[in-house]
Structure formats: C-alpha cells, structure tokens
Image (cartoon, rainbow, N blue to C red):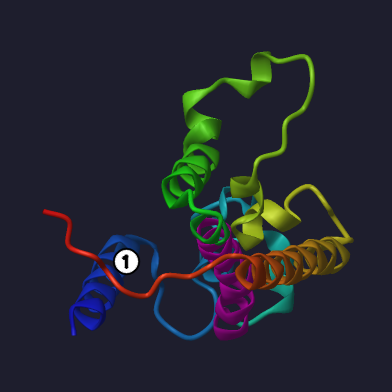
Amino acid sequence: MMVVAMIALIALFIALMALPLVTHGNGWSDAARIASGEIEPYEALISEFILNNYTPFTATLLAMIPVFCFWLTMVFVILMFGVWGSPVFGVLMYAFLMVANVTILFEAFPFQLILPIQYATLDNIISGYDGKEIQQFLKVMGVYAALIVSLVAVMMISVKRVELNFHAESKQ
C-alpha cells in the first residue's frame, strides 16, 4: 500500500511540475510549442528523434526500458555482493557510481571515464548519435542484457559454492 501511495504522490508532483509545459490537444507539447513559435527546436525538452518518430505513449514505454535495466543491474550487483558476504560494499559501490559524476569533476582527468549513470536514461543513450539512435539504443540494451545474464550466472555459481544459513542464533 505504501508503494502505491508513493507512486501516486510522485505522479502527482510530476503532473504539477509539467503543467506550465503542457498544451491542449493530443501529441507532443513540445511539437505544438515549436509550431506556435513559443520555443525554438533546440529548446525542446524532448529530443527531435523522439518527437518525430514516437507518440508520447510509445516514447514513455521505450524510455522505461533503460531505466528498468539500470535499476535491475543495480539490484543484481548488490545481490551478488550479498551472496559473496559483503552486501554493504555492493550498496556503497553503486551509490558511488550513481553520484560520482556530480561529486568528482571527471572533466579534469586526461582520459574519458564512462559511468553507468550515463546509460540510465533514453535521452543520455541516444544524444549525440544523429541518425543512428536506434542502433545506439540496441547496442546499449545488448550490453545491459549481457551484463544481467553474466550477473545471474555469477550469482548462480556463487550460490552453489556458498553455505547458506537460514536460521538465526541468539547469542547472549
């Protein structure tokens, strides 16, 4: 029940914050605002590729896939470290990976460092790949699929080798 209430609360706040950007009718608000001259195409919140090729509903479904894969990978990494006996390290490692791009200025390093958070949203995945957005999306989804299958395989092998204790002993 608490999860449903939280999802409803999040949806309510998203709707409230989007009210100034919504236009009457069906389809994309950004497309209507560009057509009316309110904004320039580069000011649109939604990328041109998505505006031209998808309806809002299908774009939402497409955008959910990388978010789901990102969080599923996170859960599996934490679970894998839990199987190895270090669940706290899994949480700390993933928390660091999620906020490292804002806490450490990687632009100052002479090499390019790619963090997992850069592949958590559809916009981050397809931006900069004009004309090859679908190929880039499929490539990233392939890497996610390989990573998830690898994590499951490693956990299956690890669980077979680990003695699991399902009872708690009270030490006094």
All told, the count of numbered labels is: 1
Q: How many C-alpha atoms fall within 10 Å of the one at disc 1: few (<14), some, or many (≥20)?
A: few
Query: The disc labelled 1 sits on which kind of residue?
Result: Ile
Which residue is labeled 1 in the image? 14
Residue at the front extreme, as displayed:
172
Q: Camera-side residue: 165 or 37?
A: 165
Residue shown at the point (48%, 70%) measured from the top left: 164
Please determine whether, in this image, residue 7 is positioned above or below residue 34: below
Question: Is residue 89 located in the magenta-colored stretch of the structure?
Answer: no
Residue 133 percent location from the top left of the image? 82, 62
Residue at the left extreme, as displayed:
172
Res 143 visible: yes
Which image quadrant is residue 132 in?
A: bottom right
Residue 144 percent location from the top left of the image? 73, 65
Q: Camera-side residue: 36 or 139?
A: 139
Q: Camera-side residue: 43 or 132?
A: 132
Residue 111 percent location from the top left of the image? 79, 21
Check disc 1 and report its element: helix, strand or loop. helix
Residue shown at the point (66%, 52%) measured from the top left: 124
Q: Which residues are magenta?
A: 56-79
Residue 100 percent location from the top left of the image? 53, 32
Q: Quadrant of the N terminus?
A: bottom left
Which image quadrant is residue 145 in?
A: bottom right
Question: Is residue 69 located in the magenta-colored stretch of the structure?
Answer: yes
**Majority SS type along the magenta span:** helix
Residue shown at the point (17%, 62%) measured from the top left: 170
Res 35 visible: no
